[in-house]
Image (cartoon, grey):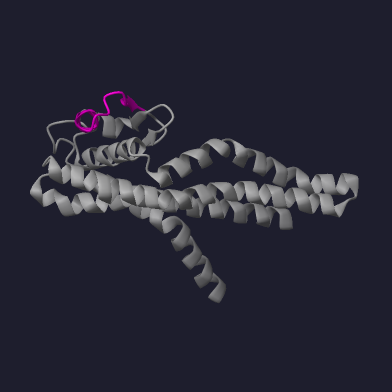
Amino acid sequence: MAIVVILVLIAALVFGPGLWVRRVLERYSEPADRYAGTGAQLARHLLNKHGLESVTVERTAEGDHYDPQEKAVRLTDDKFDGRSLTAITVAAHEVGHAIQDRDSYAPLRLRTRLVKATRGIEKIGAAVLLISPLLGVITRIPQLSLVMFGAGFLVLGSSTLIHLVTLPTEFDASFNRALPILDDYRILKKVDRPHARRLLRAAALTYVSASLMSLLNIARWLMILRR
């Protein structure tokens, strides 16, 4: 019974934030025509207002984000074309990241460097974890297997580090950039402001969910190797 309770608690910890974020984003996606302009139009307007005319606003299928390398705010179809509170708020959040980039916000710069340094490295880590026991058997050098396992474990853990570094960047983009912008330009309907705060919190916590999932990925590899 105790094991079942522990497993339920772990599942709630790992999957709960992601489910909550998804629920909040979906909840405020209706009504779909709540605002006159789309998320893409708002992003373009706000970027221009902050002297960021060179930053593009693009459509993406890979999740809403700001790309500091390509200087692009990227929105998924429902945010790019959407006129819902979710579309408007998420667009403002991503513009917040563009403003961080303009201001050389240190946590964003650190995250950008980490992402660039570890690009593709998680796949390498998974491969290392897979072949390390086999190499240990073939070479009959147990220490080699341990070294390779340790290397692979650290590589997989790099994504967790990136997500943790990301947290202050996300909250700053939501509450020190996007929310003041929405207030200053009177973008939001008055009754929507508390809901927008909830959405901005959800946008920031997206990376908490990703961090927990990356930790779960490490645990999964550990269980595989113990078999």
Tell me the magenta residue range. 42-59
Q: Who's the residue at 71% across and 47% down the image?
A: 129
Q: In the shown orientation, is residue 137 left or right of residue 115? A: right
**In the image, residue 54 lies in the stretch drawn in magenta:** yes
Q: What residue is at 59 percent from the left and 35 percent from the top?
A: 120
**Horizontal and vertical percent for residue 99?**
30, 38
Question: Quick check: 66 left or right of 149?
Answer: left
Task: Tell me how many marks there are.
Answer: 0
Question: What residue appears at the point 16 percent right and 41 percent down from the top-left corner?
Answer: 31
Furthest-bottom residue in view? 2
**Residue 149 place in picture, x, y as percent:** 73, 51
In the depicted structure, whether residue 183 falls above or below residue 41: below
The extreme left residue here reads 190
Give the percent coordinates (x, y) of residue 212: 49, 55
In this rendering, is residue 52 above or below 134? above
- Taking depth in this image into account, of 142 and 19 the one nearest to the observer is 142
In the picture, the quarter occupied by the C terminus is bottom right
**Residue 227 in sight from this viewpoint:** no
Question: For this view, does 1 lie left or right of residue 204?
Answer: right
Tell me if residue 93 can be seen. yes
Q: Magenta stretch containing residue 91, yes or no?
A: no
* Residue plotted at (67% across, 57% down): 223
Q: Position of residue 203 (x, y in %)?
A: 33, 47
Residue nearest the observer in this picture, 127 or 118: 118
**Quadrant in which the N terminus appears:** bottom right
